[in-house]
Image: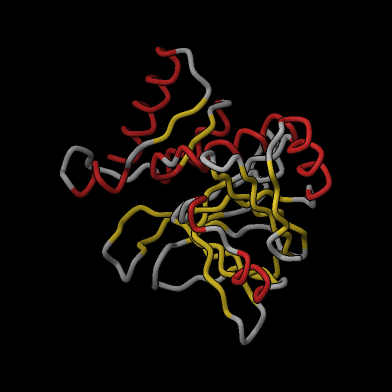
Amino acid sequence: MNSAKLYLAMRRAVRELGVDVIAVDCIVLYNTGLLKAWPCLGYMQLWYDNIIPVCEADPYATIPILIAKYLFGRNGFTVNVGVDTERGEFVYHHCYAPTNPHGSEKPEVSYIITKAHLGTKHASIHVKLPTNETVTVIGFNPEERLLSVHVAKASNNEYAPQACATKLIGSGNVNAVVRNWRWRGGWHRVVVYGDFRRELEEFATLLGLDLINEDL
């Protein structure tokens, strides 16, 4: 019920302010008692209201999400990137992801309302994201005007109580990404379904941005 109320409040705030994007500083606001719910469920629903949500009020992640929406028509989402160098796998994890990552007006995949972080976080969602598809993972560092890009293949969804609720497993050049990771771009990256490496290179050239293919 609290998640539903927060969704309605976020939707109303966006419409009253006449904006396209909302970013809630959820960890601080929840842990200090100013919010009684996490925005994860509401974020999932906001896409169907043509409102773009951004996790953890991350302004760096906002830029790749906007690029994905307005340039590619895809609903990108914020993730932490874990790596397993033994298996050559990425673990893209967060407590929310859109149920229409290809940008459809209707849900494309199913989800489970669940706990996360070993049961300490309630009303997160585990989204069963599409597999056997290519994803482009984007980071942005505004200070250096740098886009960081790598491409992987989504292979599996992991449902486990540890860490965040949604965990998309991807295969790719893990060692190169670890070697080339730019920390000043922030902790987060943005996952976008599709291979948009070439389009991002052209986009960066047009805007005078630098781009690093961190998996090459």
Q: Residue at x 41, y 46 (%)?
A: 40
Indicate the position of residue 79 as horizontal and vertical percent values: 52, 55
Q: Residue at x 41, y 13 (%)?
A: 17
Indicate the position of residue 169 as horizontal and vertical percent values: 62, 69
Q: Residue at x 59, y 49 (%)?
A: 139
Please state which of residues 46 and 215 is positioned toward the viewer in this rendering. Answer: 215
Marker count (numbered): 0
Indicate the position of residue 25 as horizontal and vertical percent values: 33, 40
User: Can residue 13 be seen from the camera position used here?
Assistant: yes
Q: Is residue 53 above or below residue 151?
A: above
The residue most toward the left is 33
Please state which of residues 55 and 111 is positioned toward the viewer in this rendering. Answer: 55
User: Can residue 1 be seen from the camera position used here?
Assistant: no
Q: Residue at x 71, y 33 (%)?
A: 208
The colour scheme used here is secondary structure
Q: Quadrant of the C terminus?
A: bottom right
Q: In this rendering, would 78 be left or right of 71?
A: left
Q: Is residue 76 above or below residue 166?
A: above
Q: In this rendering, would 81 be left or right of 173?
A: left
Q: Quadrant of the N terminus?
A: top left
Q: Is residue 59 above or below residue 186?
A: above
